[in-house]
Amino acid sequence: MSRLVMLGPPGAGKGTQAKRLSASMGIPQVSTGDMLRAAKKAGTEMGKRAEKYMSAGELVPDEVVVGIVKDRLTDADCAGGFILDGFPRTVPQAQALDDAGVKLDVVVNVNVASELLVERVTGRLSCGGCGAMYHKRYNAPAVADVCDSCGSELYVRRDDTEEVFGSRLAAYEKMTAPLASFYADKGLLKEIDGVGSLDEVQARLVKAIS
Ligand SMILES: [Zn+2]
């Protein structure tokens, strides 16, 4: 049984690792964005409550998100475990999850130095034509700012600008340190180094949870 939470800063590749782990272990990767959309579509009570906030452009309160997460984790495909990705994000959310009776086996914190994250993310170039991704330094197109595949002009997504990414990273750092301590106090926290190839990081992740 692996009931797992993945923590890590934006740009650390935690979503990609969660997806690979989900495939290799045969347990679902559960992300809050997907769950909110599904609950809304299914018209569950929690889904309807969430929709009220979302359509008003407000943040969905923790209590409602936790209700949706809890509902999702009782689905049959979660019986052998799950990977929670992107939730909880704050100590009150983690506490609410705990209070709701959701049991966890391990919380993995994927560590990547901030300077490296900034370099990785702010160097990204996206193709508006075919969706291909490049990186100024690690995966540059043959002709500057032009897509190799379709010839469209490449651009920097808003989320990948230094300004937007920098503030997301700062917000993450402010709230995640207490979250890691929260789980460390419960004896659930495992730290892994998130720098390396996909396979190297995956191997560390598998070792941390086994
Ligand atoms: Zn393209």
Image (cartoon, rainbow, N blue to C red):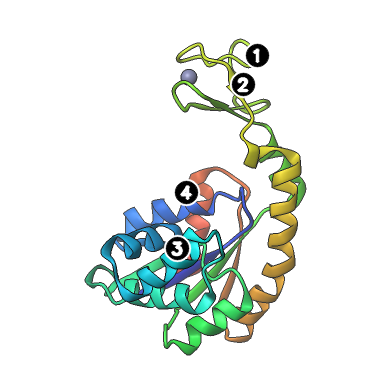
Q: Is residue 123 something one can see in this rendering?
A: yes
Q: Which residue is mark 1?
A: 144
Work out whether mark 4 precedes mark 2 in sequence or the reverse, and give the earlier one: 4
Q: Is residue 113 something one can see in this rendering?
A: no
- Mark 1: which amino acid? Ala
- Residue at 33%, 65% in the rendered image: 39
* Marks 1,3: beta carbons within 8 A: no
**How many residues crowd mark 2 within 10 Å: few (<14), some (14–19), many (20+)?**
some
The relative height of residue 30 versus residue 135 in the rendered view (above or below) is: below
- Label 2, label 1: how far apart the Cα atoms are: 8 Å
- Label 3, label 2: how far apart the Cα atoms are: 33 Å
Q: As drawn, is 114 to the left or to the right of 79?
A: right
Position in image of residue 103 (x %, y %):
42, 83
Mark 1 vs mark 3, foreground winner is: 3
Asked if the beta carbon under badge 3 is closer than 8 A to the nearest atom of ligand 1, the reply is no
Work out whether mark 1 precedes mark 4 in sequence or the reverse, and give the earlier one: 4
**How many residues crowd mark 4 within 10 Å: few (<14), some (14–19), many (20+)?**
few
* Marks 1,4: beta carbons within 8 A: no
For label 1, the SS is loop
- Label 1, label 4: how far apart the Cα atoms are: 27 Å
Residue 178 found in image quarter? bottom right
For label 4, the SS is helix
Q: Which residue is mark 2?
A: 140
- Mark 4: which amino acid? Thr
Q: Which residue is mark 4?
A: 16
Position in image of residue 129 (x %, y %):
47, 20
Residue 84 found in image quarter? bottom left
Q: Which residue is mark 3?
A: 32
- The residue nearer to you, when weighing 63 against 186, is 63
Position in image of residue 81 (x %, y %):
33, 72
